[in-house]
Image: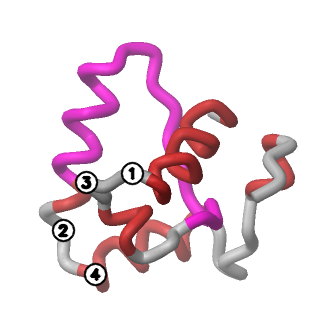
Amino acid sequence: MGTRLIQHKEGMHKKNKSFTSRYKCIYLIYYEKYTWIREAIAREKELKGWKRIKKETLINKHNPDWDFWNEDFSINL
């Protein structure tokens, strides 16, 4: 998990910027863990299609205080 957070942070310096790098999203407030990359990609695409309020509801269910979880993965951003 920490590796993916580092990849997002390093992506901030690339020319073709992703959403996370364009908007400097470096804090983790929600995540899901998958064994298989195809499942993770499918889920990410599903979440991207959701409206913001549905995403916020999902976050509120698992992290009602919207705490930053980066430290839980020993990631210093």
Q: Residue at x 65, y 69 (%)?
A: 63
Q: Is residue 36 magenta?
A: yes
Question: Is the Cβ of the residue at disc 4 closer than 8 Å to that at disc 2?
Answer: yes
Q: Residue at x 63, y 42 (%)?
A: 6
Who is closer to the viewer here, 77 or 47? 77
Residue tagged 4: 52
- Magenta segment boundaries in residue numbering: 26-46
Whichever of callouts 3 and 2 sits on the residue coming sooner in the sequence is 3
Residue tagged 2: 50
Who is closer to the viewer here, 37 or 59? 37
Whichever of callouts 4 and 3 sits on the residue coming sooner in the sequence is 3
Q: How many marks?
A: 4
**55 on left or right of 68:** left
Residue tagged 1: 14
Q: Residue at x 25, y 54 (%)?
A: 16
State the quadrant of the N terminus. top right
Residue tagged 3: 16
Question: Could you give the CA–CA distance between mark 4 and mark 2, rounded to whole angstroms?
Answer: 6 Å
Q: Nearer the viewer, mark 1 or mark 4?
A: 1
Rate crowding at label 2 as few (under 14), some (14 to 19) or many (20 or more) other CA atoms within 10 Å. few
Question: Is the Cβ of the residue at disc 1 closer than 8 Å to that at disc 3?
Answer: yes
Q: Position of residue 32 (x, y in %)?
A: 50, 42
Please tell me whether mark 2 sits on a helix, a strand or a loop: loop
Please tell me whether mark 1 sits on a helix, a strand or a loop: loop
Residue type (three-letter) at the residue carrying disc 1: Lys
Question: Could you give the CA–CA distance between mark 4 and mark 3, rounded to whole angstroms?
Answer: 24 Å
